[in-house]
Amino acid sequence: MIFIANWKMKMGLSATLELTRTLTRQLRQLPDGTEVVVCPSYLNLTSVFPLLKGSRLQLGAQDCFWEAQGAFTGEISPRDLQEQGCRFVILGHSERRLHLNETDEQIHRKVEAALASSLVPVLCIGENYEQRAGNQKDNVLIRQMQVALQGVALGADDRMIIAYEPVWAISTGGVGIEATPQEVQYAGEVIRHIVIDLFGKATLDQKVQIIYGGSVHSGNVRAFTSLPVISGVLVGGASLKADEFIQVIAAASGGGNQQ
Ligand code: PEP
């Protein structure tokens, strides 16, 4: 099970370091097979990385550019991320699609660039409220994945994570509705079939994980992580408080408080 904390642009340096220190201290004993990834803002990545040494936490970035180097003022190289200690990179987050007009074609190039720099792409896909209301969910997932992943080759050491993040269920940009486990299982199955179409079943089993994100907290996480198709969660708001994020991890495997 993988737990990815997306800290967005929510904390300054000192709050980020304090949260990181608390998590590394309190998450020393994780069950085998449990991975925890923290994704601070870019500027805080290099300050967080040294604190993770010797811990069970891994480092992720919230985006990268589609070239590793060149005349691209202000952009973030995936190669630099890898050299600075990142193993994961979130790509295609709905906030970037919305505020920066990121397209599926750009996200495709970023996925290729991330893999070329030995990063694990965490590809975010999901329909918005209008698309859901118009019964467009399947079409949106198919289009986003086909464009982002067409022609992508996963090499022997590559790994990829697909995060189903329905925009309407995200705590900050959503419409105040939580996804039901049935909806997440359904979307996960659609995603599973698209991955099989694009890469084959063996690649799905060995290199691709499907996770869920959207208002996950300690009270609902188990309902999602117990779904057969889901191997982890991407957590925004609930990852900003150490106690709550630790509860999310505990509750996912049946411990902690459940509603
Ligand atoms: C997100 O934005 O990726 C996210 C999952 O946020 P939240 O958990 O706050 O809904």
Image: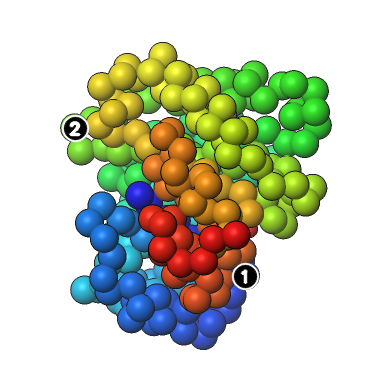
Q: Position of residue 183 (x, y in %)?
A: 62, 33
Say if residue 113 shows up in the picture. Answer: no
| Picture residue at 21% right of the left edge, 73% below the top | 54
Name the residue at 75% across, 28% down.
Answer: 131
Q: Residues within 10 Å of mark 1 (few under 14, many from 20)?
A: few
What amino acid does circle 2 point to?
Answer: Ala
Residue ranking furthest to the left: 156
Q: Amino acid at mark 1?
A: Lys
Q: Residue under circle 2?
A: 156
Q: Quadrant of residue 171?
A: bottom right
Query: Can you say which quadrant of the picture contains the C terminus?
Result: bottom right
Q: How far across and how far down the image is residue 227, in percent?
A: 46, 38
Q: Position of residue 182 (x, y in %)?
A: 59, 33
Question: Is 156 on the left-hand or right-hand side of 43?
Answer: left
Looking at this view, is 229 or 209 the one in front? 229
Q: Secondary structure at mark 2?
A: loop
Reading the chain from its start, which is encountered first: label 1 or label 2?
Answer: 1
Q: Is residue 219 left or right of residue 155?
A: right
Element at label 1: loop
- Residues 178 and 43: in front is 178
Q: Which residue is mark 1?
A: 10
Residue at 67%, 25% in the rendered image? 137
Question: Is any part of residue 165 visible from this angle?
Answer: yes
